[in-house]
Amino acid sequence: MATLLTACSNSDEQAEKGRIEQATDKIAKEAVRSIKTPIEQANLAKELTEQHNNAVKKNANPVGK
């Protein structure tokens, strides 16, 4: 009987570890997303600003003048 109780106890421990790992993974993914999103938005803003600045320079300095 003692081995049966031990087996159930180990199964419960493994299930608990599985739930903890799932929660940890979920938290980690959310943390990565919350860090990456502003960085990606900043990079996009930088690219758009550079494109705009290049267009302004090109139009301010027409070829042949």
Image (cartoon, rainbow, N blue to C red):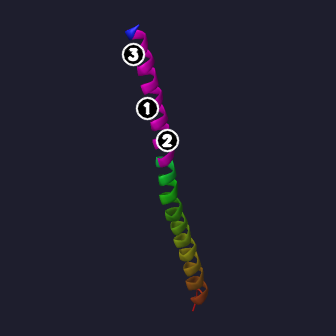
Query: Mark 3: which secondary structure?
Result: helix
Q: Nearer the viewer, residue 58 or 14?
A: 14
Q: Nearer the viewer, residue 6 or 45?
A: 6
Measured from the top left, where is residue 43 in percent x and y? 51, 67
Which residue was labeled with disc 1? 17
Disc 1 to disc 3: CB gap under 8 Å: no
Residue kind at label 3, given as amino acid type: Thr
Q: Which residues are magenta?
A: 3-27
Residue at 55% x, 84% y: name it.
Answer: 57
Which residue was labeled with disc 2? 23
Q: Indicate which disc, 2 or 3, sits on the residue closer to the N terminus.
A: 3
Q: Which mark is residue 6?
A: 3
Q: Which mark is residue 42?
A: none
Residue at 38% x, 10% y: name it.
Answer: 2
Calculate the distance from the C-alpha at mark 1 to the C-alpha at mark 3. 16 Å
Residue kind at label 2, given as amino acid type: Ala
Q: Indicate which disc, 2 or 1, sits on the residue closer to the N terminus.
A: 1
Q: Is residue 23 above or below residue 45?
A: above
